[in-house]
Image (cartoon, rainbow, N blue to C red):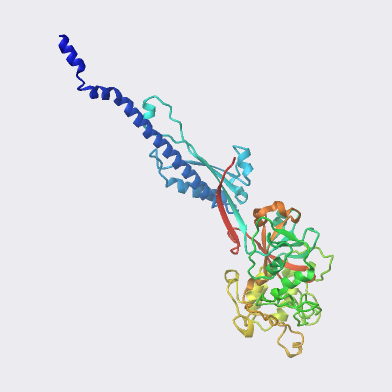
Amino acid sequence: MRKIVRRWHRDERGFVLVFLAVALPALLGLVGLAIEGVRLMTLDTELAGIADSAALAAANQLDRSPDAIPNARDAANALANDAASADGAGRTSLSFRFGATLSDLRDSPTFTLADVEGAGAAYVEVTTGVRSIAASFLELVGATVMPVRRRAVAHSEYYACDVTPLAVCQADPDAFVASSRPGRQYLFRLGPAYANGSLALLDPSDDRGGRRSVRLLASNAPAFCYTRGIAPRRNVTPSEFDDALNTRFDRYYNRQGPIAPDLAVYPPAPNIIQGRRLETCTSPPEGGSLKPPYPMPRDSAYLALGRSSQWDAGTGDWRTAGAFGGSGAPAAVTAVDEYLFWNHANKSPLFQQQLRASATRYELYLRELGLDDATETNPVATRGGLAAADTMPTGGPLLANYNGLRESPVPRCYAGPGQPVEARRRVVYMTVTDCGALDDAGAAGLSRRVGKFFLTEPSDGGAVLAELVQMLTPRRDDGKYRHVVQLVDTF
């Protein structure tokens, strides 16, 4: 018996089976834990990706429009519905919060803008619903399975580029925007004191006090964006300002002599009708009675301009402004009557009525070029009686006794290499901002309130009559806005 026991004790056959039987549950447990850990990590990663992508999709819809918030939610939900997760579910529920600033979301866990406040939304927080792994091995062995939820915050901002380096100074920019409307005329003035209605020329960050900002003011394609480091140019003179701005009106010489060569290369607009009898190339225009010919109709407040004229006295109801009076249109009742008599007496009654029905002076100007809102970027030739000859102003009735009074509505002074074919040459894009706080406004602040203004007459001594065409929006920006959407860290 002892021999049998010793032989059995030394026999190791079958030990592996015994070891395997004892170790197998533990090995399976380790494999299960590893698989479950990978599933949890995969679920967390996928939910993080869904949250990030949904936040970016939502932020991409924050375009300052009233319906931006519902559109943002729809875009994010559509993306999330197409995403599959590691827990096998096909749809990921999302919750949203919207804010005008990052602190809105960071400082209060319950704050969110209402749907009707979509125009002010710039930030969106997206949080996924709680997810966990179904039929989890961890649950079978009694372990606690932590639920998974991910959050992401995205920022939507628009930056304006290819704009005029000018700021309309306003202590309360929002109040200006609220009171503005297309067709309203303003009298802006270049000024060292940044009062309401003053204009500030802006210097790029890399050219403080140089000539670049003056050239950008004259340019028909200014390579200028609202960025960090731009500053107001305080030492530009009214004559420099006039010379640069009035290249649009075919004015290329100042009182002292030839205009600077770096400004003379910029072409004028194709329609430069001004309402001045004296045909010169001076900038600003010297002399020249306004009666007749008559300029594009002004608002009633600006029929007679003075240095003390209120910058925002224009009513915007320019079609009812009274006539300037004087010779040329004795039966005229309004300034529009005078303008049509003087410049379009040779046109058909139908076309005259179309001009009279124009909602803004800019619309009237476009019609004189044979254009409209949809075609305003089309090049138009006016020299030599081309293209727009049937619609262009004549500069005076086509009668022999007015020959000495008429002005040329098409450029005749410009001698540079370009072509005067761009209708928007008489348009400037200016930010409306608190000029005393330019450093604090930042690129986003300067870009938020950009106005499209139509120059109705040349600048004179730094004074500019300009009509508001529109405040730019992302949906109607004339190609000036660059949309930047990015994820942000809220901590």
Q: Quadrant of the N terminus?
A: top left
Q: Position of residue 52 (x, y in %)?
A: 50, 45
Image quarter of residue 65? bottom right
Q: Position of residue 213 (x, y in %)?
A: 70, 65
Is 363 above or below relative to 8? Answer: below
Horizontal arrangement in the rendering, residue 66 relative to residue 456 (left or right): left
Q: Position of residue 477 (x, y in %)?
A: 60, 62
Is 398 above or below relative to 113? Answer: below
Q: Is residue 299 visible?
A: no
- The residue sitting at the top extreme is 1
> Between residues 154 and 299, which one lies in front from this camera angle?
154
Q: Residue at x 37, y 25 (%)?
A: 141
Q: Is residue 242 visible?
A: yes
Image quarter of residue 107? top right
Horizontal arrangement in the rendering, residue 12 relative to residue 52 (left or right): left
Image quarter of residue 24? top left
Is 129 above or below relative to 487? Answer: above
Is 20 above or below relative to 172? Answer: above
> Between residues 44 and 249, which one lies in front from this camera angle?
44
Give the total of numbered labels.
0
Q: Quadrant of the C terminus?
A: top right
Q: Position of residue 15 (x, y in %)?
A: 23, 22
Q: Residue at x 41, y 26 (%)?
A: 143
> Between residues 76 and 179, which one lies in front from this camera angle?
76
Horizontal arrangement in the rendering, residue 35 relative to residue 102 (left or right): left
> Between residues 178 and 379, which one lies in front from this camera angle?
379
